[in-house]
Image: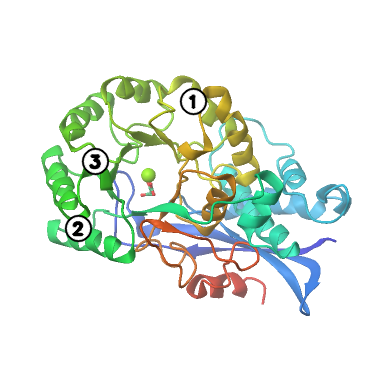
Amino acid sequence: MKIVSIHEDTLPISSTMRNAWVDFSMMDVSIIAVVSDVIRDGKPLVGYGFNSNGRYSAGDILRRRVIPRLMAADPADILREDGSNFSPEQIWDVVMQNEKPGGHGERSVAVGVLDMALFDLVAKIEDKPLYRYLSDRYGDGSPDEDVFVYAAGGYYAPGKGLVELQDEMKKFLDLGYTVAKMKIGGASLAEDLRRIEAAMEVVGGGQNLAVDVNGRFDLDTALAYAEAISPYDLFWYEEVGDPLDYQLQASLGERYPHRMATGENLFSLPDARNLLRYGGMRPELDILQFDPVLGYGLVEYLRIQEILPDYGWSPRSCIPHGGHQFALHIAAALKLGGNESYPGEFFPTGGFADGAVVQGGRTSPTNAPGIGFEPKAAFYKHLRALHI
Ligand SMILES: O=C([O-])CC(=O)C(=O)O
Ligand SMILES: [Mg+2]
């Protein structure tokens, strides 16, 4: 069993929206196809991956370091001991040769793109949907049948006023979501409060609405907003300060009695552990949003899962960032607390498989083998074009 070829490209997912830091006019993702010599129905099995949503493509690192290391590896070193399948864990060690620790930057994204494709391939070789494969190998063999998902959106955009924001929130409810998320921190406090109140009016109150600052605030601004939004009792207050400012997070936690969520821009086990050690996050209340792609893939995410109990955390407190099908499978298999969803953003990578139904704020991964990119037509045509 071997990897025959790896194909990589960059796909634009640009749009006119913005959060408190980033306008998405130049946003793109890396996409990858890993072609194996395993033949099924007359065709080679291929694993596909992409780098989640919201961080830029990492093609240079893939082309210059990650892919060459994998292609140069002895085929025996990248298989499980019994030779029955590829080992994403061993491949992780191969592609991380000669890399210093720390300073994870875009390297963790490049490794995550490959890792997603490997898990897609490995599950296809076992002819199982990914959540079943993961549950059998890393979980308890009985995955959750469905997963809590919330609709992320509420971006700032040209010409988007309160009415348009309310229409967007209404659309989320019509699609079957019960909780929506919106951006704050990109306008004045007074304007953001008007936006929050307008959204709450539609979604049914603060417990159905999360707000996301994308790391924009210093401590004073974080606390001023905290005081102003406290009476709303929001679903959560997300990524309020710089992702690596654990002291800010801890100070906020001392003053803000409602749920906080963060972690989408922590890209490694040591960074995640530092959040648990020093970030003042409260295991009985708060939510951890590490993205299983951006942070060196599922291999590293599993290492993070392993240390959670040491700090009093349960997998149910994890709701990954990214709104991708990969994390949906992981959430079902590892019994996480839920998954993000982008019903209206990041075309064509956002959203789940075509025809996926959300009901009462819950959905299920597809039963196609692997991740199920094939039944996501508008995206799959780009993945397939990588190697055809
Ligand atoms: O706006 C973004 O980059 C995405 C984001 O923070 C989220 O989904 O929580
Ligand atoms: Mg966020």
- Mark 1 neighbour density, 10 Å: few (under 14) some (14–19) many (20 or more): many
Quarter of the figure that contains the N terminus: bottom right
In this view, 2 is above or below 54: below
Distance from disc 2 to disc 1, alpha carbons, whole Å, reads: 34 Å
In this view, 101 is above or below 372: above
The answer to whether 313 appears left or right of 77 in the picture is left
- Residue 97 lies in quadrant: top right
Name the kind of residue labelled 3 in the image: Gly
Name the kind of residue labelled 2 in the image: Leu
Disc nearer the start of the sequence (2/3)? 2
Disc nearer the start of the sequence (1/3)? 3
- Mark 3 neighbour density, 10 Å: few (under 14) some (14–19) many (20 or more): many
| Residue beneath disc 2 | 165
Front disc: 2 or 3? 2
Give x and y (percent) for residue 52.
50, 54
| Residue beneath disc 1 | 276
Q: Nearer the viewer, residue 49 or 276?
A: 276
Image quarter where ligand 2 lies: top left
Q: Residue at x 65, y 44 (%)?
A: 140
Q: Give the SS element for disc 3.
A: loop
| Residue beneath disc 3 | 185
Q: How many marks?
A: 3
